[in-house]
Amino acid sequence: MDDLLQRVRRCEALQQPEWGDPSRLRDVQAYLRGSPALIRAGDILALRATLARVARGEALVVQCGDCAEDMDDHHAENVARKAAVL
């Protein structure tokens, strides 16, 4: 997993917005580095295993959601409505 993380960190982020305040950006990045992980390593490994099944034709991926979600729309009612579509 550490090798994968290092490879990902070497990738150039090609679609970054214009960050107006580089100092604030560094502060936020430092804050995020010190924060707990949003997902567990075991969850990543499970996803990789599931996607390997997809690659072998043993399963399907159903991708849904907005292309660019409005952060104000992330509340229980909207999430439940979207989940009901599935």
Image (tube, rainbow, N blue to C red):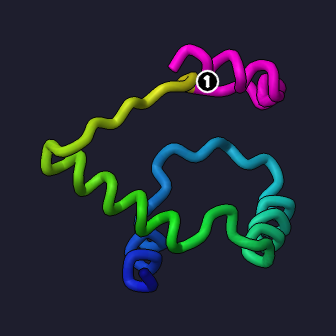
Report the quarter where the N terminus lies. bottom left
The amino acid type found where label 1 is placed reads Ala
Residue 2 percent coordinates (x, y): 45, 85
Decide whether residue 82 is among the magenta residues: yes
Count numbered badges in the picture.
1
| Picture residue at 61% right of the left edge, 17% below the top | 84
Residue 48 percent coordinates (x, y): 35, 61
Q: Is residue 66 left or right of residue 20?
A: left
Q: Is residue 8 left or right of residue 39?
A: left
| Picture residue at 76% right of the left edge, 73% below the top | 36
| Picture residue at 78% right of the left edge, 60% below the top | 25
| Picture residue at 80% right of the left edge, 20% below the top | 77
**On screen, 32 above or below 74?**
below
Residue 61 percent coordinates (x, y): 34, 36
Other residues around mark 1 within 10 Å, as few (<14) / some (14–19) / many (≥20): few
- Identify the image quadrant of residue 47: bottom left
Label 1: state its secondary structure.
helix
- Identify the image quadrant of residue 78: top right
**On screen, 7 above or below 73?**
below
Decide whether residue 79 is among the magenta residues: yes
Q: Which residue is mark 1?
A: 83
The dominant secondary structure in magenta is helix
Q: Residue furthest bottom?
A: 2
The span picked out in magenta is 68-86
User: Nearest the camera: 70 or 11?
Assistant: 70
**On screen, 14 above or below 70?**
below
User: Nearest the camera: 8 or 22?
Assistant: 8
